[in-house]
Amino acid sequence: MTDSASGTPAGGAGASHGGNASGNAGAPEGATGGQPPVPPPYPPSAVPGQQPGAAPPKVIPTSAEHAREIGSAYFPPVGSPGGPISLFVHEFAEGYLIHAGWPAPEDPTAPPANPGGTNIVITKANGDVTTVPNFPPESAIAVYRQWYRPGTA
């Protein structure tokens, strides 16, 4: 049996019900070629007076203390429950490496509760903020020098 208006089998005229125009029935909106949509970027911690999830404005640091203030937006508040006890700044030729200091574990032989984490580098020239692995300062700076490309942070 055919649909006399279109010449197609009955029930097949026009777009299918429940599908989308590209033919990816059941694919999430924004998916292309059967791929899931790209997740949104992970935002830094919320800064008072700023929209939640908005990146802090790019600011060129003028000193190590100023870099610490800028970097504080990327870490939980110092002294908060489960948060860092301090933020440390290591100045080097291209920028400032900022990493959090965490309280000593109650049992030093136990594995860490939350392994991993990241540090950030704020570039002196233009204020770009780059995340680097939670390595010792010299190693983290070496990784930054390998990864960083101006204008892509």
Image: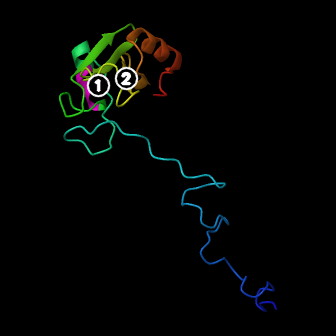
Residue 133 seen in the current view? yes
Residue designated by label 1: 71
What secondary structure characterizes most of the magenta part? helix
Q: Position of residue 62 (x, y in %)?
A: 26, 15
> What residue is drawn where x is 29% and y is 30%?
75
Where 2 sits versus 21, above or below?
below
Q: Position of residue 132 (x, y in %)?
A: 43, 22
Number of labelled discs? 2
Q: CA gap, disc 1 to disc 2?
A: 7 Å
> What residue is drawn where x is 73% and y is 82%?
12
| Outermost left residue | 79
What residue type is disc 2 on?
Ile
Highlighted magenta segment, given as a residue range = 68-73
User: Residue 7 vs residue 86: left or right?
Assistant: right
Quadrant position of the N terminus in the picture: bottom right
The magenta stretch spans residue 69: yes
Could you tell me if the residues under marks 1 and 2 are in contact, i.e. CB atoms within 8 Å? yes
Residue 138 position by quadrant: top left
> What residue is drawn where x is 24% and y is 23%?
106
Quadrant position of the C terminus in the picture: top left
Q: Position of residue 134 (x, y in %)?
A: 40, 21
Residue 27 position by quadrant: bottom right
What residue type is disc 1 on?
Gly
Where 110 sits versus 27, above or below?
above
Where 46 sits versus 152, above or below?
below
> What residue is drawn where x is 23% and y is 23%?
69
Q: Secondary structure at mark 2?
A: strand
Residue 63 seen in the current view? no
Residue designated by label 2: 120
